[in-house]
Image: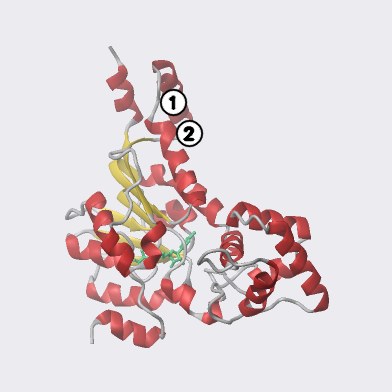
Amino acid sequence: MNEAAQLQGVTGRRAHLPVMLQEVLTALSPKDGEIYVDATFGAGGYSRAILESAKCRVYAIDRDPSTRLLADALARDFPGRFLLLAGCFSDMVSLLAQQGVTGVDAIVMDLGVSSMQIDQAARGFSFKHDGPLDMRMSCDGVSAAILVNSLPEDELADILYMYGEEKASRKIAAAIVAEREIAPIETTAQLAALIRRVVRQSGEMDPATRTFQALRIRVNDELGELERALDAAPTLLRTGGRLIVVSFHSLEDRIVKRFLRPKSEVASRHAMAALVQQQQDSGLALFDLPSGKAIIPGVPETRLNPRARSAKLRVAIRNSVQRAHAEMEP
Ligand SMILES: C[S@@+](CC[C@H](N)C(=O)[O-])C[C@H]1O[C@@H](n2cnc3c(N)ncnc32)[C@H](O)[C@@H]1O
């Protein structure tokens, strides 16, 4: 039995297939002696492949305590070269500083939830499995059930619209409020059934899909986490360091695209001078974008792994703003 199967036996969950692994490795180009951050450890698919590719060191981060078991296996296989740091990736600078690390050669982020989280009914992420309406990646803080049973109707509707792009947000929020006046909504099946009663299915997508995505994003402050992590990345990345982000929906990709664009497409000398000043004031870094467009998975991967269908990979190389400025001199 291979290791993935053994771990599956231990955790009782389907192994997570790493998305766009080859593309991530190509962008990362692992080298002996370098230090990498796998900011979303999950089942460790990226970490393991990176550690196998070169005699490098990997610091992984995950906010889900259940990832510890898989991390321990990796630490045994790559002694002295791998460490899991429990926490949020928005705190990457301080998590790494606690290990005495202030500069790294690449940061990889594979956003969202893992297959193990989705498939475990008790975690409450999925409308396909009945479980408590939880959705907390870190297993602490405010659960989806608390939000659904306590937020004002307008606020619920706004969450569904903003984070789920759900057109029927007002209708669903009204139905939630009516239902919870009778009895609290405590399970994923209860919420999914309610949504299916008020929204008619069009196409293959389950009517509950967008509401579940919206609640998950809100419960875990996923977009805020992403923004803060992107802001933190330049502080850790050395010049030439690679930032690699795999996103799964337009809300995430928009944040990544906007974050990278202004610093890599500085139109004028005047704008560059302003940016140099800004960097001196704030430590802001510039990025080069080796490929302007997002990279998407090939057909064989999307056939094998439906989760990869919506994936978009963006790569940026940390530049030095002084170098970019010098290049603009006549
Ligand atoms: C898509 S999975 C990563 C899978 C991984 N690349 C692999 O190959 O196994 C995302 C992981 O990131 C974690 N995660 C998501 N947001 C996080 C955050 N803000 N801070 C730390 N971990 C986070 C989740 O708990 C989950 O385990």
Residue at 65% over, 67% down:
142
175 in relation to 232, above or below:
below
Where is residue 268? Give x, y as percent. Answer: 40, 18
Residue 264 shows up from this direction? yes
187 in relation to 278, above or below:
below
Q: Secondary structure at mark 2?
A: helix
Residue extending furthest top?
A: 330
Q: Judge by depth and name the residue closer to the eye, 78 or 299.
A: 299
Q: Which residue is mark 1?
A: 275
Q: Which residue is mark 2?
A: 282
Residue extending furthest right?
A: 181
Quarter holding the N terminus is: bottom left
315 in relation to 160, above or below:
above
Identify the amino acid type marked 2. Answer: Ser
266 on left or right of 20: right
Where is residue 73? Give x, y as percent. Answer: 30, 77
Where is residue 262? Give x, y as percent. Answer: 44, 32
Identify the amino acid type marked 1. Answer: Leu
Q: How many marks?
A: 2
Within 10 angstroms of label 2, few (less than 14), some, or many (20 or more) residues?
A: few
Give me the C-alpha separation between circle 1 and circle 2.
10 Å
Q: Quadrant of ligand 1?
A: bottom left
136 on left or right of 273: right
